[in-house]
Image: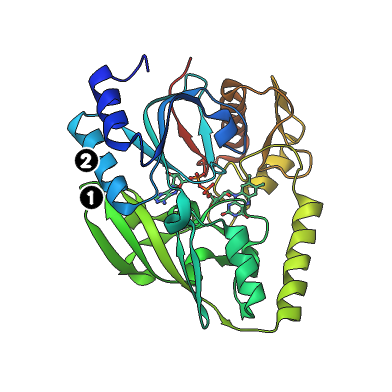
Amino acid sequence: MNNINEIFAEKLKNAFGVRCKIKFNEPMASRTTFGVGGRADVLIEPEKETDLAEIIRLCNEHNVKFYVFGRGSNILVKDGGIRGVVVHLAGYWFERIVINGIEIECGTAARLKAIEGEAKKNGITGFEFLEGIPGTVGGALRMNAGAMGEEIFNIVKTFRLMDYSGKISEISAEEAGVKYRECEALKNAIALSAVLRGKIGEQEKISKKMEDFAEKRQSSQPKERSAGCVFKNPPGLSAGKLIDELGLKGRQIGEAMVSNEHGNFIVNIGGAKASDILALIDFIKNEVKQNKGISLETELEIIGEDL
Ligand SMILES: Cc1cc2nc3c(=O)[nH]c(=O)nc-3n(C[C@H](O)[C@H](O)[C@H](O)COP(=O)(O)OP(=O)(O)OC[C@H]3O[C@@H](n4cnc5c(N)ncnc54)[C@H](O)[C@@H]3O)c2cc1C
């Protein structure tokens, strides 16, 4: 509690101590798939939209920054941790998955794996590409996550979001300002729920497609801890291929290494620090710029403070 002001911490505890899980000085390494990074001043888990709105209001009132985390599978937290509040949606309402014919209505803390599983169980096709993306619906919407030539916004009908004044609205996929790994509407808003839409399918065919996708991943992606692809693909090019062509696979800084299986993955081969990963990112960017004349942009979100 040393980094946020005591009055704010007290107010948080008084307002939410009973209704939400609150942790002070929470280690973020266990909250990200990379497994690195320092501590967050506060981690809070609202289970209701009204509580989420009140948390945002309190943060704004006290000029405290807040960050929304899903599974942390696209985030690198720096070694000095996060000054402010990490909001992690949790509980029945945010994790719900409801089937309505070929539509799936869900809270944004629902895991993609669970969504894909329910779609298969109910004979709904179109969700198979989610196989192996280890995030939540909220993170996938924010990132417009995609794989195997598909992306989440291909199956989004509408979603509800809360802006940073606590106002809730519902918009269609077409209104979301979606690009490759980007959703404009969620740059300054929190996704609350979504209606996803597939097509009628056959369970056997769905299973087979999921198995094929899983096999493809297993043969081309590393097993070590990572945050998936580090860089966005430049238009018409593959970032992984560029990195591979420069012979950078296996390049190591500290315990961070460019994966031998996939050039666009950096893996934590043991006790990597965020600073190792950041140094490797800079090194790759420089090499690609100098040798190929291309500026790589990170897909990975980097947040927090240096030590
Ligand atoms: C092994 C591995 C494989 C991967 N493969 C793929 C892949 O094939 N395709 C792909 O696109 N990605 C892939 N990823 C990256 C990652 O899984 C996706 O980007 C995923 O959608 C992120 O979801 P998350 O819940 O972990 O989000 P987080 O990492 O927690 O957050 C990512 C961003 O979303 C924001 N966010 C989270 N929840 C919300 C919310 N409710 N409302 C608004 N913003 C929110 C966060 O603030 C942050 O900006 C992979 C990662 C790993 C580790």
Q: Position of residue 272 (x, y in %)?
A: 66, 23
Crowding near pointer 2: few (<14 within 10 Å), some, many (20+)?
some
Which one is earlier in the sequence, the residue at label 1 or at label 2? 2
The residue shown at (65%, 84%) is 201
The residue shown at (32%, 37%) is 16
Mark 2: C-beta under 8 Å from nearest atom of ligand 1: no
Describe the element under mark 2 as helix, strand or loop: helix
The residue shown at (46%, 48%) is 90
Residue farthest to the front, as pictured: 18
| Nearest to the observer: residue 275 or residue 210 | 210
Q: Position of residue 250 (x, y in %)?
A: 77, 32
User: Tag 1: residue type?
Assistant: Gly
Residue farthest to the left, as pictured: 61
Q: Which mark is residue 166?
A: 1
Figure colour scheme: rainbow
Picture layout, residue 113 above or below residue 71: below
Is residue 149 in view?
no
Q: Relative to 129, is 301 on the left or the right?
A: left
Circle 1/circle 2 CB separation < 8 Å: yes
Mark 1: C-beta under 8 Å from nearest atom of ligand 1: no
Is residue 23 in view?
yes
User: Tag 2: residue type?
Assistant: Arg
Name the residue beneath numbered marker 2. 57
